[in-house]
Image (spheres, rainbow, N blue to C red):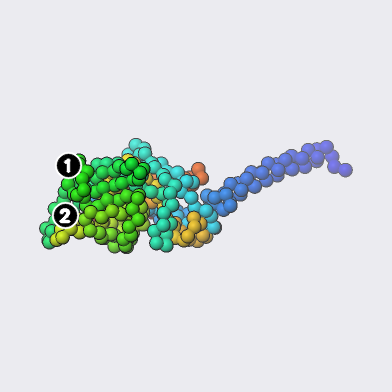
Amino acid sequence: MISKESAVVVLAFALTVGVYGFIVLNYVSIFSPQSGGVNQFLIRSVSLNYYDGSVWRLVIQVGSTSDLDFKLGNVGLRVLVNGVQLPVFIDDAVQVGGDRLVLGRASPFLSSGRVLVSRVVGSSVNYEYVDFIVYVDQANKLNIVIDDDLDSVLDNSYLIRFSSDSSSTYELNFYDDISLVVGKGVTLPVSYLDLLATLSVRPNPAVKVLYGEVSYLIRVSDILSNLRGVVVTSWLTGKDLRLDANKHAYITILIPIGRVVGGDELNIDLTVNNVKVLSKNYRIPQGLSGSGTLIMS
């Protein structure tokens, strides 16, 4: 027989094991790949793309040590610039770009304004602003028009139009500075804007519009200057939203031109399933000129 004192010790030990066993089991359950695998996320790199001294895109490469489902709806983001929090928009749409799946869209968060275009005639280059018009038509279709002038009038003369009602197909080149070449006045699927903003690997991709001897260059970063706030998208290769072990995906943070410039302090808090996976301050270097990419970590 055991003494009363020994029984108390055994009971206390059993209770302790029971409590800590419960905690450990729940820790495994919460963070297991079957429930999202949040602790499996690894931040592999953070880079930013800039244009003319302004940051317009951050690209966060994430990996995983085990297979898990990858859903943008599980991603949370807080962005502060010099201590001021910026509005963040996340859309759960899924689009296909070649062999890649793109999660999220920027197009629903664009507002009417203006966009800077380069007008090229021979060796002469002029920069001019034109109207950027966003509207929903009577069929409830989103339309985005880049006009050929700046008179706040929507007419039949424009450089290019993107519409959710369009089924036209043109070749997109995500590896070239000129990612899309079309003739003046064409209508393209609005999804092309989202694909270019997320998938292009160049630091400042552009769309070229041809009109006789004149060509217009429209930079994707200038288009995104009309975003109402920061937009989160993502992409991964494959045919389903599955991030395989030891593979990687990309979380893309799209920022309106002029919101983050040289000398600013940028704070990024990234969560997945409410668990923080990245929290860091970045000081944006001064003197960023032209277009380029900086590896931040």
On the image, the x and y values in percent for residue 98 come to 39, 62
- Position of the C terminus by quadrant: bottom left
Image point (54%, 51%), residue name: 37
Q: Residue type at mark 1: give it.
A: Asp
On the image, the x and y values in percent for residue 103 come to 43, 51
Image point (72%, 40%), residue name: 15
Q: Is residue 230 visible?
A: no
Q: Residue type at mark 2: give it.
A: Arg
When the figure is inspected, residue 87 is found, relative to residue 297, above or below; the finding is above
Query: Dot 1 corresponds to which residue?
Result: 151
Q: Residues within 10 Å of mark 2 (few under 14, many from 20)?
A: some
When the figure is inspected, residue 6 is found, relative to residue 214, above or below; the finding is above
- Callout 2: helix, strand or loop? strand
Which of the two discs, 2 and 1, sits closer to the camera? 1
On the image, the x and y values in percent for residue 111 come to 30, 41
- Who comes first in sequence, dot 2 or dot 1? 2
Camera-side residue of 195 and 50: 195
**Quadrant position of residue 86:** top left
Camera-side residue of 32 and 4: 32
Image point (35%, 47%), residue name: 106
Query: Dot 2 corresponds to which residue?
Result: 119
Q: Residues within 10 Å of mark 1 (few under 14, many from 20)?
A: few
- Position of the N terminus by quadrant: top right
**Quadrant position of residue 195:** bottom left
Outermost residue toward the front? 138
Image point (31%, 62%), residue name: 171
Q: Is residue 34 visible?
A: yes
- Callout 1: helix, strand or loop? loop
